[in-house]
Structure formats: structure tokens, C-alpha cells
Image (spheres, helix red, strand yellow):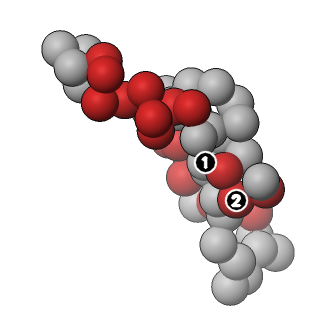
Amino acid sequence: MKNYPGLMEPYIADIPAGRPARVDEVARAIVWLCSDDASFVNGHSLAVDGGQLSK
């Protein structure tokens, strides 16, 4: 996508955070869900979307 920034502009404009997620941000959410810290989380969809669903 770096070669075609025009393709990303409408997508990025729709993200309240103003940028796409970094790989490490998504990975940290996955690691947390797989950890004991999330042991009481069941049947929930975690949106790692920069606020798109909250609009």
C-alpha cells in the first residue's frame, strides 16, 4: 500500500484514530486475549479498529 497511498486515503479517513493499526497493536490484543489476564473474557468480540465501530 505504500506504493499506492491514494488507495488508503478513504480508508484512513474513516478511522477516528486517523491511521491504520500497527501490527504490534493487533498482536498485543491477541496476546492479551490468550493470557491469564483475560481468563474471565468469554464470548466477546474485541474490535481492534481505531474506533470505527464507535462512530
Q: Would you place residue 26 above or below residue 55 in this image?
A: above
**Please, what secondary structure does the residue beneath circle 1 have?**
loop
Q: Is residue 45 left or right of residue 24?
A: right
Quarter assignment of residue 41: bottom right
Q: Nearer the viewer, residue 33 or 52?
A: 52
Q: Residue furthest bottom?
A: 43
Q: Nearer the viewer, residue 42 or 52?
A: 52
Three-letter code for the amino acid on which mark 1 is drawn: Asp
Image quarter of the N terminus: top left
Residue 38 x, y percent position in the rendering: 75, 63
Residue neighbourhood size for the residue with mark 1, other residues' Cα within 10 Å, grouped as few (<14), some (14–19), many (≥20) = some
Quarter assignment of residue 13: top right
The reply to whether residue 15 is in sight is yes
Please tell me whether mark 2 or mark 1 is closer to you in this view: 2
Q: Is residue 24 left or right of residue 7?
A: right
**Residue visible at 17% across and 14% down?**
3
Residue 26 image label: none
**Residue visible at 61% across and 48% down?**
49
**Residue visible at 29% across and 30% down?**
7
Residue 49 image label: 1
Q: Would you place residue 29 above or below residue 16 in this image?
A: below
Residue 5 x, y percent position in the rendering: 30, 18
Quarter assignment of residue 36: bottom right
**Please, what secondary structure does the residue beneath circle 2 have?**
helix
Q: Nearer the viewer, residue 46 or 8?
A: 8
Three-letter code for the amino acid on which mark 2 is drawn: Leu
Q: Would you place residue 25 above or below residue 29 in this image?
A: above
Tag 2 residue: 53
| For the residues bearing labels 2 and 1, Cβ distance under 8 angstroms | yes
